[in-house]
Image (spheres, helix red, strand yellow):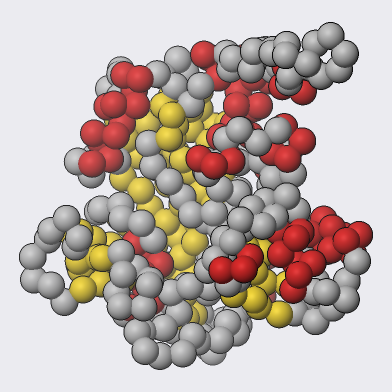
Amino acid sequence: MAAQTIHLSAEHNGQTLAAALKRLLSDESWNQIRKLVASRRIQINGNLCLDAERKVKVGDVVKILDHSAAPPAKLDDVRLVYVDDHLVVIQKPAGVTTLRHREETDLPMRRKQLQHTLDELIQQQLAAHLGIRLVDDANTMRKRGPGNSNRRCRKPTLDRRLRIRPVHRLDRDTSGLMVFARTPEAEQKLVHMFAKHEVQRAYVAVVYGHVDEQTIDTLLVRDRGDGLRGSTSANAESAEARRAITHIRPLEHLRDYTVLECRLETGRTHQIRIHLSEIGHRLCGEKIYTHKVGQPPLPETSAAPRQALHAASLTFLHPITNQPLRFQMPLPKDLKSWLLKLPKRSP
C-alpha cells in the first residue's frame, strides 16, 4: 500500500482507528487493517500508533507509511542514572511520550502494553532496582460469570515507592536526561527551581546551514497564525505571549550543517525547535517547525533518523540536601551513527 496522509473529518469522530481506516480503505479487510496497525505503519498526528482500538477525532491526521516505523521504546531503553529517596534521574530514549494522556489512563493493561509511556517504564525500572514486585492489573479486573456478575475487584494500588512526579518534559522524539520527583516536597521544590531557571540544561542539536554563536530572545505564543506555536511581534510579555531565551553555540561546522549546543534560560514548549527554525536553521529531522507562516513546509533532506535534538546535560542543586548534581549523557547510537555519515567541511 502506498504512503498517504489523511485528515479525518466529522464522520470519523469517536470511531476506533480500525473503524476509521476500514471506512477510508474500503477495499481492505478487517484483518488487513489490523495488520497495517500492528506492523507499525500508522501514525496519528505524527506519532506511531499500535492501538487499533484507539478513538480518533475530527482533525486528526492519519499517515499511512510505506514501510514499518522503528519499534517503540522498550524497558531496556530507559536507564536509571541516579536514584535516592527524593528523586530519580533517567536517560530517556527517543520515541516515547512522558505521560499517558488523561483519556488513556484507564485503558486495560493489554492496550497499554502496546506502547508504554516513559513514566510506566521508569516505574518498572524502579521496581527492579528496589526489589518491588509489580501487580498485574489483569488479576484485578471485574470478574464476570454466573454468580459473580456484580462482584468488583479493587484496582491495584501502585506502591508509593514507585510513584514519580514529572517536573519538566522532553518531546516524544527528543532523547536525553530528565529528573522526576519521588516525593511531594521534592516535586514542589523542583518545580520552583525550574520556574526560577535554577536548573541548567544543555542540548545538542544538529541544524541545517552554518550558525554562529548567538542568543535568541523572543515572545512565544500558542498560535502564530497558522495553528503552530511561534514568536510574536508583541512588545510585552503577557499571559498569551511568554518570553523565551535560548543561547546557542556551535560545536562543529560540517559542510551543510552545524552541530550546536543549546542552553535554555527559559523552558517553553518546543522552544529550541521554534527558535532554530525562526532564525532559518531548523533542526534536521524536524517535522513541524520547518517554515514561516504562509510558506510551504521545507523538505527533509538530511536523512536524520528523527529530530536531531538531545538533552545532553542536567545540572542543579538537590532540592532537599542542596548537594550539587551534574549529569551528562552522550549522543545515542541513532544520532551518532547518522552524524558520522554527514559530509564534513572541505579542507
- Could you say where residue 151 lies in the image, as x and y percent from the top left? 73, 11
Number of numbered markers: 0
Residue 249 in view of the camera: no
Q: Is residue 205 left or right of residue 280?
A: right
180 and 257: which is toward the camera: 180
Above/below status of 312 relative to 83: below
Q: Residue at 60% x, 84% y: name it.
A: 301
206 and 131: which is toward the camera: 131
Q: Is residue 109 left or right of residue 59?
A: right
Above/below status of 168 relative to 63: above
- Could you say where residue 289 lies in the image, as x and y percent from the top left? 43, 74
Quarter of the figure that contains the N terminus: bottom right
Dividing the picture into quarters, in which one does residue 33 lie?
Answer: bottom right
326 and 35: which is toward the camera: 35
- Could you say where residue 226 lies in the image, as x and y percent from the top left? 36, 78
Q: Is residue 46 left or right of residue 25?
A: left
Q: Residue at 46% x, 50% y: name it.
A: 170
Dividing the picture into quarters, in which one does residue 127 lie?
Answer: top right
- Could you say where residue 205 lies in the image, as x and y percent from the top left? 46, 65
Residue 327 in view of the camera: yes
Q: Residue at 60% x, 23% y: name it.
A: 126
Q: Residue at 64% x, 53% y: name it.
A: 55
